[in-house]
């Protein structure tokens, strides 16, 4: 299978071991003073290790390798780091609770909780401010989870689109006022949601057919959250769309750490 996986430039690697410690899947180890990939199927390709490498020796590439295997990775991490560490393995909850996931998938078909709702009419006349009270919700739609939203939902049509890591609203005290107001939103977790291919296809369709006017990405400072930005960029490339993109990185204390705008 052709998929994303870590690649190590041994000439740049100093063997500092920072990448080994940050990889929840224990896919890397230091051998003879250099970082090595233990097994292809232990690497989830999310790139949590990229941000900690001081020499730029790591990068994500796409090539023919074995599929990422959460169960084998779980057993590997449990063996080398213990059971508590193994619980953090990407995708293990979804695999171990597949029955529960099946119920969740069924909800998309009939559960009122996943029924599409459009709240844009709550915003008053065109000349009124889009958000007037700190106690007023700026949410324009339902659902918001990327796994549940429809790529043909009317609220995505030529929208100002917010792609958000699902931890961000908990870190930002003024999330509604600053970022959600006037935007349609989709949220997900690049670490815990084991549906990246599905997400890529759905987001590609949104970019391809809904023609959003702009995209704002909000992600947390933790390395694994970089996957939100990566998925958006991949979907834009796949859709061959040149949409104005802005990326903001949020600290766990709720501060805006960096801002990058691509027009």
Image (cartoon, rainbow, N blue to C red):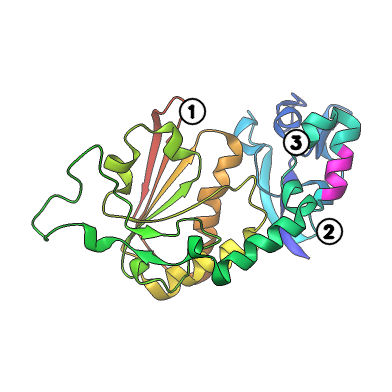
Q: Position of residue 208 (x, y in %)?
A: 44, 73
Q: Which residue is mark 2?
A: 66
Which sits in the foreground, 14 or 237? Answer: 237
Q: CA distance from mark 2 to mark 1?
A: 34 Å
Residue in the image at 50% along x and 44% along y: 166
Q: Which mark identifies residue 201?
A: none
Query: Going from the N terminus, do you reach mark 1 or mark 3 first?
Result: 3
Q: Which residue is mark 3?
A: 11
Can residue 31 be seen in the rendering of this structure?
A: no
Q: Position of residue 127 (x, y in %)?
A: 8, 57
Query: Going from the N terminus, do you reach mark 2 or mark 3 first?
Result: 3
SS under mark 3: loop
Residue in the image at 50% along x and 49% along y: 229
Compared with residue 231, is residue 117 higher up or lower down, i.e. above or below? below
Q: Nearer the viewer, mark 2 or mark 3?
A: 2
Q: Position of residue 121 (x, y in %)?
A: 23, 63
């Amino acid at each position: 299978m052709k998929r994303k996986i870590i690649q190590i430039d041994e000439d740049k690697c100093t063997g500092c071991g920072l990448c080994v410690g940050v990889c929840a899947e224990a896919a890397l180890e230091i051998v003879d003073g250099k970082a090595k990939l233990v097994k292809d199927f232990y690497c989830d390709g999310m790139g949590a290790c990229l941000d900690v490498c001081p020499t730029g020796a790591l990068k994500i590439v796409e090539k023919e390798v074995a599929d990422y295997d959460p169960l084998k990775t779980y057993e590997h991490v449990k063996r080398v780091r213990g059971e508590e560490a193994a619980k953090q393995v990407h995708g293990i909850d979804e695999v171990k609770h597949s029955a529960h996931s099946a119920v969740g998938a069924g909800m998309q078909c009939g559960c009122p909780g996943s029924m599409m709702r459009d709240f844009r009419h709550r915003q008053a006349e065109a000349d009124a401010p889009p958000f007037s009270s700190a106690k007023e919700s700026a949410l324009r739609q339902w659902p918001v989870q990327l796994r549940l939203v429809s790529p043909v939902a009317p609220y995505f049509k030529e929208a100002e689109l917010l792609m958000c890591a699902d931890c961000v609203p908990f870190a930002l005290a003024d999330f509604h006022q600053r970022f959600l107001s006037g935007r349609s939103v989709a949220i997900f977790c690049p670490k815990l949601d084991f549906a990246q291919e599905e997400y890529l296809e759905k987001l590609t369709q949104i970019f391809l057919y809904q023609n959003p006017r702009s995209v704002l990405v909000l992600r947390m400072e933790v390395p694994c959250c970089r996957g939100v930005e990566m998925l958006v960029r991949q979907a834009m490339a796949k859709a061959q769309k040149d949409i104005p993109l802005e990326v903001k990185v949020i600290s766990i204390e709720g501060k805006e750490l960096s801002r990058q705008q691509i027009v």
